[in-house]
Image: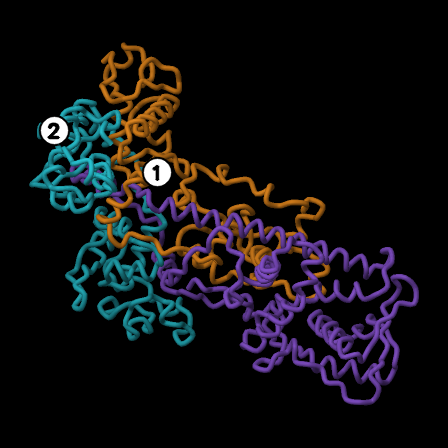
Chain colours: A orange, B cyan, C purple
Amino acid sequence: MTDPPAGYPAVDPAGHPAGYPAVDPELELGLLELSPALEAVLMVADAPLDAPTLAAAVAHPVADVEAALAGLTAGYDADGRGFELRNVAGGWRFYTREAYAPAVERFVVGGQQARLTAAALETLAVVAYRQPISRGRVSAIRGVNVDGVMRTLVTRGLVGEAGSDDEGGAVLYRTTGYFCERMGLASLDELPDLAPLLPDVDELDGDELDGDEPPRERRAGAPPEDTDG
Amino acid sequence: MTDPPAGYPAVDPAGHPAGYPAVDPELELGLLELSPALEAVLMVADAPLDAPTLAAAVAHPVADVEAALAGLTAGYDADGRGFELRNVAGGWRFYTREAYAPAVERFVVGGQQARLTAAALETLAVVAYRQPISRGRVSAIRGVNVDGVMRTLVTRGLVGEAGSDDEGGAVLYRTTGYFCERMGLASLDELPDLAPLLPDVDELDGDELDGDEPPRERRAGAPPEDTDG
Amino acid sequence: MNDVAVEPATSIDVHLDVFEGPFDLLLGLIARHRLDITEVALSTVTDEFLAHTRSLGRTGELEQTSSFLVVAATLLDMKAARLLPQATVEDEDDLALLEARDLLFARLLQYRAFKQVAASFGVRLAAQQHRHPRAVSLEPRFAALLPEVLISLGRDSFAELAARALTAKPTPVLSLAHAHTTTVSVREQAALLVQRLRRTTTTTFRALTADAPDTLTTVARFLALLELFHEGAVTFDQADPLGELHVRWTGGDDDVEVSEEFDGTAAPHLRPSGLAAVPEDGSDD
């Protein structure tokens, strides 16, 4: 077992010789070849699997597993396979490659998700960047009541409850792992920075911006925060 | 598109020059590359697919598809991938390779699979209270596609098929005895009555409840007859 | 579940019927005039904004009007301020106006930022939708190894889960708790102000709103006053720069008709928005 099988890239982000993690040949006895073992496990998974879970299954160190996953991903890309390995929502999963969607979608009928409305997308965006956040604060930012839309997002599994506000006890919302999956994000850190889109607002108190306690608006009597009690 | 992408074997059991079926370059315009397109379709296929089905999905001639499948199979074998393409009873499907079964087994029994996901639980709850019910109706109620989740529930033995819809012929699902066992119920009668938990029926707009249900059942807001007695 | 298409990335062309609240409308109007978000832009679109707020009343969606009123009040405030002698900022009210103006700008910009990322979310979700995850049933040999399913819910929680899933619109119990359906009519408030102004001729805004039972009434009186100003029935005056805002009756004894601009005809009352009937943008369900 000195040569990796053909077809695996001789790329190894961890600097190991040939696409496989360096394992002392003595220790390697009885161990499964890492990359194909990972392929086998990923082939039966129906959710993204994180590196520790995979490491436990293939009985290799997590660091080696991570290196092997990166190698596989690069290899599938270089080979122009019809599938790809993606790191989404903190785990790894096989996906079909976008270029072959026409073929996949001719075969998979009815699998299309209904698209989100502009209202739902805006609400989702606010939750994504300001989480955890109450419905009232999302309402204040969007200027409209968001109860119905938030419910839709929860039903779709894109948003979930995340405890309640310390002060008012309002339910707080956050995005879910499924949101990252659908967006193709490894984690929320990959969301683009909002700051460049927000010129000159730093002079203002953030709380006021979120509509929590804008004195003027209070006077005007209409912020919808109290909807969620 | 004269050279196959790297990673595909230059083996062609059908005798074509380079791993790809011979296609007149003129005709090939606008066509998807055959081998990766097949990989993509097979990646999401749950059941073995025969060559004509695959040919329809990828829009290539059946003979070319057969040659490409043979090429892919040989390639995976030569590369020592963790998966293989098997022709079972005339259909093709991805399977894990026998050599890596230990890793797959460790993953399967590893406990990750014991607990149901939130989506699976919710789908199960809808089936339990509205059985027999089609996947389409569960989808309409939950607002998401439930194909994958329903498959999981069937695989886990919690839900089973129960004939088909009178009208559309859609497959209907019901909970199984194993479901009752796992819930600690002697029978479905022991499921708590839903009525007190549902808001006043009159306030509900049926259409919002679940898109395609007949008004009668939609309004009922209670478990179907066979559950309560 | 209707399938409304995701708006294109630059979606600020206005369909007044489908705007998403006051900020959306303002942005749309400003974009239609091809303006940047500036004070001039706001004043340019103030009338259109008010016209739209008025039409909301006509179409019987007055519940939604209150969230528009917050913005309308600031816009009118700004407009009124420009009609007054310019001076340096000293008074608390003027500070409040500046603050309200800055806040409106900031919230508009913030809303625009979220609108932009929302559009990019839409594009991304649509693109990602063409990458299909593998999710197939386990090969039978492995399925047989699956551990017993663990259903961590008790039967009551399970029933609650079912009820939640089956209920598209749970009744908003909390908001009903403080649902006292007061309504405030700008027209009625105007009539009240006319009465008082005829009696006293000169007074201050502070005095006119001192007995307002709630903030909504204050807003209504403020709007009524601006309407009266529009009709030439009152003038505003400040004795010293940025002193108290004095209101003087100039309308004589003839009847002054305050338009139904803010009240509309279909539903002639403003409702506080903290009630159950807060505007829903539930185009989604």
Q: Residue at x 48, y 47 (%)?
A: C120
Q: Which residue is mark 1?
A: A48
Q: Between marks 1 and 2, how big is the CA–CA gap? A: 38 Å
Amino acid, disc 2: His
Q: Residue furthest left?
A: B89
Residue A229 visible here = no
Q: In the depicted view, which residue is nearer to us: B218 or C67? A: C67
Residue A29, position as x, y percentages in the image? 24, 14
Q: Is residue C147 above or below residue C27?
A: above
Q: Is residue A62 above or below residue C67?
A: above
Of all chains, the one bearing label 2 is B
Residue C246, position as x, y percentages in the image? 86, 71
Q: Is residue C103 above or below residue B204?
A: above
Please state the total of marks drawn on the protein image. 2
Tag of residue C84: none
Q: Is residue C253 above or below residue C208?
A: below
The N terminus of chain C - image quarter: bottom left
Q: Secondary structure at mark 2?
A: loop
Residue B129, position as x, y percentages in the image? 29, 63
Dot 2 alpha-carbon crowd within 10 angstroms: few under 14, some 14 to 19, many 20 or more: some
Q: Which residue is mark 2?
A: B16
Of all chains, the one bearing label 1 is A
Q: Secondary structure at mark 1?
A: loop
Amino acid, disc 1: Pro
Whether labels 1 and 2 belong to a single chain: the reply is no
Res C197 quadrant in image:
bottom right
Q: Is residue A87 left or right of residue C108?
A: left
The C terminus of chain C - image quarter: bottom left
Residue C192 visible here = yes
Residue A47, position as x, y percentages in the image? 32, 40
